[in-house]
Image (cartoon, rainbow, N blue to C red):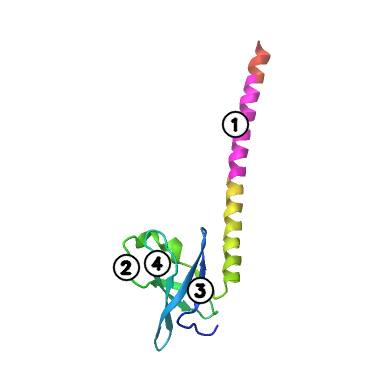
């Protein structure tokens, strides 16, 4: 992955939505480059948050920290952590991959609940049958 530029748009997919960002500053160090990106919309209760990102060895843009302190920053992790994308289509693919995983977990949980309820129901039916047979 090449370097990012000031003004370049990024997209951050999470379980609720895809949040657009824009690079607002670049800080170069001897061993790394840190990009500061600002969300273009409201993020949780904090508004337009600014995050620090790096490009890792595999070329993936990753969150490394918040650019400043926010009043409710303890609840921001789900909204800011993870991978950022330069192409909206890639962010959309990741978003739907997250949605697929969440849907599968939901189905799996409901299947478990159904099976437990079915066992309980069958037990009640059996007890009622035995009680009725004794009469």
Give the total of numbered labels.
4
Label 1, label 3: how far apart the Cα atoms are: 51 Å
Mark 1 or mark 4, which is nearer to you?
A: 4
Can you give x and y, in whole percent of width and height, for residue 66 in the image? 38, 70
- From the image, tell me which residue sits under label 3: 10
Disc 2 is placed on an element classified as loop
Disc 1 is placed on an element classified as helix
Residue beneath the point at 47% across and 71% down: 21
Residue 42 figure quarter:
bottom left
> Camera-side residue: 104 or 67?
67
- From the image, tell me which residue sits under label 4: 48
Local crowd size for mark 4, using a 10 Å CA cut-off: few (<14), some (14–19), many (≥20): some
Disc 4 is placed on an element classified as loop
Dominant secondary-structure state across the stretch colored magenta: helix
Residue beneath the point at 66% across and 15% down: 132
Local crowd size for mark 2, using a 10 Å CA cut-off: few (<14), some (14–19), many (≥20): few
- From the image, tell me which residue sits under label 1: 120
Chain-order first, disc 4 or disc 2 = 4
Vertical order, 69 against 113 (above or below): below
């Amino acid at each position: 992955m090449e370097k990012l530029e000031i003004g370049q748009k990024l997209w951050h997919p999470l379980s609720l939505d895809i949040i657009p960002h824009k690079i607002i500053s670049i800080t170069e160090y001897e061993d790394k480059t840190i990009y500061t990106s600002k969300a273009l919309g409201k993020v949780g209760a904090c508004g337009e948050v600014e995050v620090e990102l790096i490009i890792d060895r595999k070329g993936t843009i990753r969150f490394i920290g918040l650019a400043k302190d926010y009043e409710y920053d303890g609840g921001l992790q789900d909204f800011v952590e993870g991978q950022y994308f330069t192409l909206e289509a890639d962010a959309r693919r990741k978003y739907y991959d997250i949605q697929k995983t969440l849907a599968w977990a939901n189905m799996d949980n409901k299947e478990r609940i159904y099976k437990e309820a079915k066992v309980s129901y069958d037990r009640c039916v059996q007890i009622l049958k035995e009680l009725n047979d004794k009469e």
